[in-house]
Amino acid sequence: MLKKIAAALAAMVFATASLAAVEANKGSAADLDGLKGVGPAMSKRILDARQTGPFKDWPDFMSRVKGVKEKTAEKLSADGLTINGESFKATGSGEGKKPEPKPTTAAKSK
């Protein structure tokens, strides 16, 4: 019985820890490594870029941290990374999206 309670408590602690937001301007290497998709190399790049000053926003973060583009920023944000308390909001640049089909001439004549 005690083992089941301990296991349940451990599961809740780990679930809560994975949902906690990590601020890119304040998180330690260990905090950053705890995010899905961030390993030692990525956390080092984030910490190195942070040495020049805090990140102003997501575009600043993406321009200063090598390897972080819109798709990666979306994933990192979904996994709990924030910049000044803000989650990533896609710019809608249309990268990788198919263009809308043009109407056919038959549809135009009606």
Image (spheres, grey):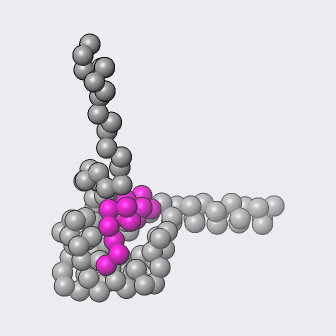
Total numbered labels: 0
Residue 68 lies in what quarter of the image?
bottom left
Residue at 23% from the left image edge and 86% from the top image edge? 51
Q: Is residue 33 visible?
A: yes
Image position of 77 with respect to 102: above or below: below
Q: Magenta segment, which residues?
A: 66-79
Picture quarter with the C terminus = top left
Q: Is residue 26 visible?
A: no
Relative side of 55 to 16, left or right: left
Q: Is residue 67 magenta?
A: yes
Picture quarter with the N terminus = bottom right
Residue at 31% from the left image edge and 20% from the top image edge? 106
Image position of 3 with respect to 52: above or below: above
Image position of 32 with respect to 72: above or below: below
Q: Is residue 34 magenta?
A: no
Of the pair 3 and 19, the residue shown nearer to us: 19
Q: Residue furthest right?
A: 1
Q: Residue furthest top?
A: 110
Relative side of 63 to 41, left or right: left
Query: Whole-percent x and y of residue 63?
Result: 23, 73
Residue 109 lies in what quarter of the image?
top left
